[in-house]
Amino acid sequence: MPEGIGSDPRRRTSPARWRVLGHPDGILVYQARCIVENHGWSAPAAETTYKVVLGRAGVYRRRVNGRTAFADATSVLLLRPGDEMAVSHPLGCGDSYTCLEVDAEVLARRPDARRWFGGTGWAGSSDGALDLAHRMLAADLRRGLDHFEMAERLHRFLGRLLGFVSPDRESPDVDLDRAVGRRAATLAAHRQLADRAREVLAAGDFSIGLEEVARAVGASPHHLSRVFQRVTGTSLTAWRNQLRVRAVLDTLAESDGPPLRVVASEYGFADQAHLTRVVRAQVGHPPAHLRHLLTA
């Protein structure tokens, strides 16, 4: 696994800045920030390991085994050996993510091995608690852990992740199928509308209003709000708050980050108190405490 700048030599991928955080006992964990050289699709790359990809910032489109989807800072992706993925960056900005690559032999020794080996990959969105756990783990790995503690922490996180993506959790798509009577064209149109709204939200400065988002995607505010809720399982307001809290967490992780009042203004909050309320509601901690937890 490279550490520096360039394409992953093990497979054809987009160029990126890579940083390895650890490699204990058959689990490789690293962070990457893609470098966008063109907006088109990369060549499909076949996976050779079990892989968890957790979004941190930015947006991209992915095509996994022929199925295209939009991904942002909330995205979580589980890939299995043999899966093929290509990516593009239609907005021209590079995304950043954390990746865990796990050897099959390691998963085979876990008590939940059957769930890792059975079925297909999984794609969805993390909630605030899972995202914070991911970011705190990465911060601790950057600070430095011995291999024993590193392996234990990573195994605990894998168990938490598997619990989050339990097959017992009903996907928002199930409600969408019911709502539109399983008409394929309508399903596709609704998913496309929601993805376009996510692009607009991700490309904005968090001060964009509902009317502006609706105009950008060519829909009425009411129709957009209703469809977005059905496709994603959450409201546009809640999704926007997820995106901007993740952006705030990135800023709080910087050792020389700006004061909280400046952070509040930069990300469209009314004031520092508003920032604190929204961040606490999303991840359970106030920004000042999170700055202490996430700064490596």
Image (cartoon, rainbow, N blue to C red):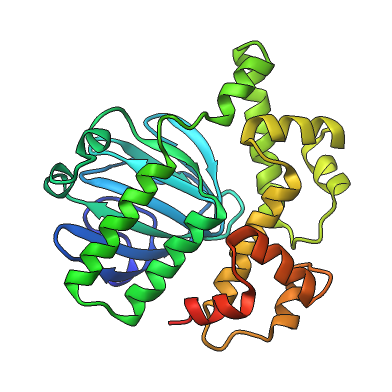
Q: In the displayed structure, would residue 45 be above or below residue 142?
A: above
In the rendered image, the residue lying farthest to the bottom is 256
Q: Residue at x 52, y 82 (%)?
A: 292
Viewer can see residue 70: yes
Image side of residue 109 versus residue 168, left or right: left
Image side of residue 98 versus residue 9, left or right: right
Residue 163: x percent and y percent? Answer: 39, 43
Report which quarter residue 47 is drawn in.
top left
Q: In the displayed structure, would residue 29 be above or below residue 115?
A: below
Q: In the displayed structure, would residue 104 be above or below residue 247?
A: above
Image side of residue 109 versus residue 99, left or right: left
For the C terminus, the quadrant is bottom left
Q: Residue at x 57, y 78 (%)?
A: 289
Viewer can see residue 220: no
Residue 16: x percent and y percent? Answer: 39, 64
For the N terminus, the quadrant is bottom left
Residue 139: x percent and y percent? Answer: 41, 74
Q: Residue at x 63, y 23 (%)?
A: 176
Residue 252: x percent and y percent? Answer: 57, 77
> Total number of numbered labels?
0
Image side of residue 43 versus residue 149, left or right: right
Q: Residue at x 32, y 37 (%)?
A: 84
- In this view, the residue in front, 155 or 28, is 155
